[in-house]
Image (tube, rainbow, N blue to C red):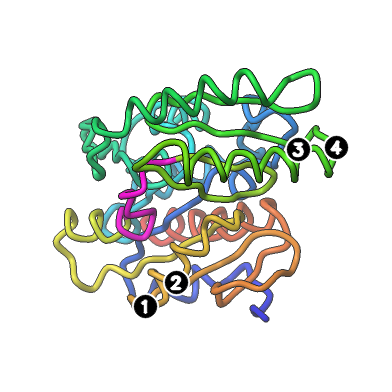
Amino acid sequence: MPKLLSKTLLVDLIPRNRLLLCLDYDGTLAETTLNPKDAKPLSGTRDAVQTLSFYPDDVVIAVLSGRDAQTTRRMLGIFSGLYYVGLHGIELLDRNNRTHMLTPVKHCLPALHSVRDWLIKEARESEGFMVEDKDLSVSMHYRNAQPAAAQDMVRQLEYYVNYVVKGLRITHGDMVAEVIPSNTAGKGFAISHIRADQKDPKLMPVYFGSDPSDEEAFFAVRREHGVTVMVGAERNTHAEYRAESPADVIAALSLLANMLVRDFR
């Protein structure tokens, strides 16, 4: 099981390393909400992340999400100095506001539209489901559905994706099933892309994530000798550390930000 996160972890790492702080959004910088549109960053999040972005020689920041990158940026409210990875690694919005497509998706659009139309018809809002169309992916949220109905709908979605259309796959998160192009390399690949963009082989990745879909990134970051932190209740995970809540993440980020401010006065 992962070790409990010490709020001084980042402060302890910074004297010997330049950090690539990779921060999941939902469940890490914001509490998980019944409606994903209501997920606002925790108090203190914006100040801590903004302050850290002022010290690029020590910290590079990337915010990663299943949302599209522009939406995540708008929700966090920081519009410069950060990388934003969207749609589980399909797209990257760099620090110069340029969008990079990390996964070719045009060939998948007809299949995605077919899945979207099927979900809108079958996963009814009146039964607790919510369909989120992200253009290059589509999600079915079932946090408000009855467990038996949710399980049945997930099975139906898996059948549709596996046998009715081609070129897609499902990634499972916290009460959400997301349909993405099957060639999506994932958040771990996006992190490697950012490291290459930085041209700093000594840049140490540190990944904070809460979702089961973050396990791929945990595995990739540990393979690169980085640090991984799972946020939330105990579960089987590739992460080395565990933070009990987003508040613990913000405390660690704030402590590092305060240290950098103090040291550069």
Mark 3 lies on residue: 143
Looking at the rendered structure, which numbered label has been put on residue 146?
Answer: 4
Q: Nearer the viewer, mark 2 or mark 3?
A: 3
Task: Determine the image quadrant of residue 232.
Answer: bottom right
Q: State the CA–CA distance, disc 4 to disc 3.
A: 8 Å
Q: What residue type is labelled 4?
A: Gln
Q: Which of marks 3 and 1 is in front?
A: 3
128 left or right of 160? right
Could you say which is closer to the camera, residue 74 or residue 65? 65
Q: Nearer the viewer, mark 4 or mark 3?
A: 4
Task: Let me know if residue 147 is in the magenta part.
Answer: no
Label 4 sits on a secondary structure element that is: loop
Residue stretch rendered in magenta on the structure: 180-190
Q: In the image, residue 207 lies at what x, y percent?
A: 47, 62
Q: Is residue 236 above or below residue 127?
A: below
Asked if the residue under mark 2 is in contact with the one under mark 1, i.e. CB atoms within 8 Å, the reply is yes
Label 4: how many Cα within 10 Å (few below 14, some 14–19, many 20+): few
What is the quadrant of the N terminus in the image? bottom right
Q: In the image, residue 154 lies at what x, y percent?
A: 66, 43
Mark 1 lies on residue: 223
Label 1: how many Cα within 10 Å (few below 14, some 14–19, many 20+): few
Mark 2 lies on residue: 219
Mark 4 or mark 1, which is nearer the start of the sequence?
A: 4
Asked if the residue under mark 1 is in contact with the one under mark 3, i.e. CB atoms within 8 Å, the reply is no
Q: What residue type is labelled 3?
A: Arg
